[in-house]
């Protein structure tokens, strides 16, 4: 639900607890065994939250369920036992003939397994990086050799020539495009308004949908969408670190339109309100939902701003007081840095699997992710806190992009790709379904 401080965007992912409460009603009676299992699943996710670090990212189901979970304070072992029992009950339900209901059954099973895995991890069990991503996020991150990053560094070296180490040259160049504080609000609101306008050309959102924009400091993330239910979000932007101009486009799409705000609004409307599927009133951060949420939010940038370079040059650069003639070089540099986001995956894999120590992983990030020592330390702290979560951005983006392009077909129009994308957002599909 957040735009992290991942290296490609000079940003790093750290978990933060978030439990939002709403008034979406649960069905008064169970219509199928899946409804009963879904309610138990939600209550187990809520019970797990006090044991973790922000395990519940959003919740807008019945408030009494949250109160009961806080009061019960179930131990981890009991949560794990109950999750196994609920999974067994779901497995006993015959695979439905309705495709969407069959997806729901798989969704519950996969998320119950992720919940059980999280219980084991919080109980002290250590998994390899790849096993962890498979169990929590229903996906494995491809391996990227150092030669791939070396090629990107060579391109950066040619793009930003001059004296001094490459990292310092890149950082000096980017500093020229930090949004002035007095221009910040105009730049962000302009980008978000444009992303919303373009998104509404493709999807009819509830008439009452809305968001509040806030600027904050002293946070371990770059931006965050706090979904409150009833198609309402609070979008917070951390202004403590320098904000380069492309960040406005990323946040507008990722946190807002067609990213997290739209994703949660569509799930709420189609699955919670229309079908009464209460499992979608809760968003456990360490779950396959995160890969779909973060991946679709990142791919949404490409869909809503296919003309990103021209939009940044012609609209945002003048607003920020920058010379539009420099937009081309700047946007090319940001695109190359984005390719280095996979370096975070490799650093996390090597560190969490015990193949390198903390300092070696940090130094590797300064070389291959183009991070300053200070930012590399921030990323390492995020890896210790959120472990393998970073794959949800780059691997998630790649899976969503490939899925949309494959389902849309060769040479598909932008409108057709939007159709496939929005169908994904409004469905209980899993990362494994995207392959």
Image: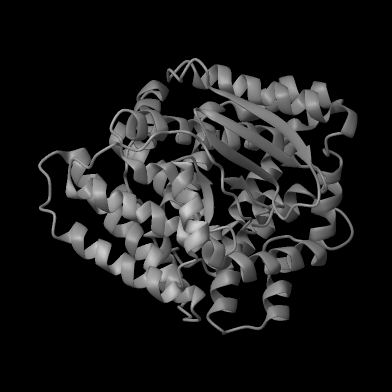
Q: Is residue 317 visible?
A: no
Q: Position of residue 80 (x, y in %)?
A: 37, 71
Residue at 67% over, 53% down? 155
Residue pictured at 38% horizontal, 72% vertical: 78
The residue closer to the viewer here, 416 or 333, is: 416
Q: Residue, x 53% and y 65% (percent of image)?
A: 388
Would you say residue 351 is visible in this rendering? Answer: yes
Where is 74 relative to 100, above or below? below
Residue at the image point whose x is 58% and y is 58% from the top: 54
Q: Quadrant of the N terminus?
A: top right
**Which is nearer the eye, 304 or 272?**
272
Name the quadrant containing residue 365: bottom right
Q: Nearer the viewer, residue 158 or 295?
A: 295
Seen from the viewer's position, the closer of residues 375 and 34 is 34
Above/below status of 327 relative to 290 = above
Q: Is residue 266 above or below residue 384?
A: above
Q: Position of residue 14 (x, y in %)?
A: 65, 59
User: How does the figure colour the protein chain or chains?
Assistant: one colour
Q: Position of residue 321 (x, y in %)?
A: 87, 25
**Count of numbered tags:** 0
The reply, left or right, for residue 128 in relation to residue 183 is left
The picture places residue 19, in percent across and down from the top left corner, at 56, 48
Where is 375 relative to 188, above or below? below
């Amino acid at each position: 639900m957040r735009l992290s401080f991942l290296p490609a965007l000079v940003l790093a992912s750290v978990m933060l607890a978030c439990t939002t409460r709403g008034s979406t009603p649960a069905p008064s009676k169970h219509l199928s065994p899946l409804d009963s299992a879904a309610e138990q699943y939600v209550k187990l996710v809520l019970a797990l939250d006090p044991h973790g670090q922000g395990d519940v990212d959003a919740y807008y189901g019945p408030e009494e369920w949250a109160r009961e979970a806080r009061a019960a304070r179930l131990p981890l072992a009991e949560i794990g036992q109950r999750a196994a029992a609920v999974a067994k009950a779901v497995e006993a339900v015959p695979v439905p003939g309705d495709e969407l209901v069959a997806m729901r059954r798989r969704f519950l099973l996969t998320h119950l397994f992720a919940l059980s895995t999280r219980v084991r991890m919080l109980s002290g069990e250590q998994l390899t990086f790849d096993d962890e991503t498979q169990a929590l996020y229903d996906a494995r991150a491809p391996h990227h050799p150092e030669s791939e990053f070396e090629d990107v560094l060579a391109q950066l070296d040619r793009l930003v020539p001059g004296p001094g180490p490459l990292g310092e040259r890149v950082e000096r160049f980017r500093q020229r495009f930090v949004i002035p504080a007095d221009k910040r609000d105009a730049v962000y609101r302009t980008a978000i308004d444009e992303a919303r306008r373009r998104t509404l050309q493709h999807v009819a959102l509830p008439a009452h949908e809305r968001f509040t924009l806030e600027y904050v400091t002293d946070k371990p993330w770059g931006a965050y969408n706090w979904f409150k239910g009833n198609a309402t979000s609070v979008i917070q932007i951390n202004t403590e670190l320098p904000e380069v101009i492309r960040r406005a486009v990323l946040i507008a799409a990722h946190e807002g339109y067609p990213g997290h705000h739209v994703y949660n609004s569509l799930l709420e409307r189609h699955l919670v309100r229309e079908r009464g599927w209460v499992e979608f009133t809760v968003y456990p951060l360490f779950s396959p939902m995160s890969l779909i949420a973060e991946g679709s939010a990142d791919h949404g940038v490409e869909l809503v701003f296919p003309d990103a370079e021209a939009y940044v040059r012609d609209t945002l650069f003048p607003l920020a007081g920058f010379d539009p003639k420099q937009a081309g070089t700047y946007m090319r540099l940001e695109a190359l840095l984005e390719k280095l986001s996979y370096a975070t995956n490799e650093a996390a894999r090597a560190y969490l699997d015990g193949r390198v120590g903390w300092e070696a992983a940090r130094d590797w990030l300064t070389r291959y992710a183009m991070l300053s020592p200070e930012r590399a330390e921030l990323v390492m702290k995020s890896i210790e806190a959120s472990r393998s979560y970073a794959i949800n951005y780059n691997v998630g983006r790649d899976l969503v992009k490939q899925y949309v392009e494959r389902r849309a077909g060769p040479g598909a129009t932008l409108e057709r790709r939007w159709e496939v994308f929005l169908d994904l957002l409004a469905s209980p599909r899993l990362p494994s379904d995207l392959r």
